[in-house]
Image: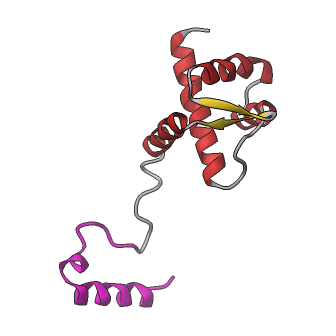
Amino acid sequence: MGELDALRVREDVLQAMYWIRSEGLGEAPQREELARFLAVPKETLTPYLDRFVDEGYLERVGDGFALTDFGTQLGKRSFAEEFAGLTGQAHGECDEDCWCHESPDEAARCLEERKQHVH
């Protein structure tokens, strides 16, 4: 296993595990679940998971793997960077430059206008 491959797989695994946990789909997925989620053979993923345990990113919990605090930090950052363009403001929401941030009265007016503008 090359170092660049290990970095790429680590990012994918930590990001996936962070998302799985954040969505309430599991705290300690088994290697079969992770392999299926990442669309790689279990036999390919297994040595990487073992390595990530040894390096302190994951810990074994029963038959599964859980993020350590360190793994959680990296997974969260990787997830945020990967999906930054998709997790910003939604349609109909104001942005940081909106005039509504000038005062509480303006904020209330902006909220009322957005409530009335329903699709």
Numbered label tally: 0
Q: Residue at x 71, y 22 (%)?
A: 45
In this rendering, the answer to whether 113 lies above or below 83 is below
x, y (%) of residue 93? Answer: 39, 73
To which quarter of the image does residue 116 belong? Answer: bottom left
Q: Residue at x 73, y 31 (%)?
A: 39
- Colour scheme: secondary structure
Q: Residue at x 72, y 48 (%)?
A: 26
In this rendering, the answer to whether 18 lies above or below 53 is below
x, y (%) of residue 18? Answer: 59, 44
The main secondary structure of the magenta stretch is helix
Q: Residue at x 18, y 79 (%)?
A: 102
Return the residue nearer the eye: 36 or 52: 52
**Residue 115 is inside the magenta segment:** yes
x, y (%) of residue 68? Answer: 58, 36
**Residue 102 is inside the magenta segment:** yes
To which quarter of the image does residue 64 belong? Answer: top right
Q: Is residue 31 left or right of residue 102?
A: right
Farthest residue to the left: give it: 102
Residue stretch rendered in magenta on the structure: 93-119
Q: Is residue 75 left or right of residue 94?
A: right
Q: Is residue 49 left or right of residue 15?
A: right
x, y (%) of residue 76? Answer: 49, 43
Q: Which quarter of the image is occupied by the N terminus?
A: top right
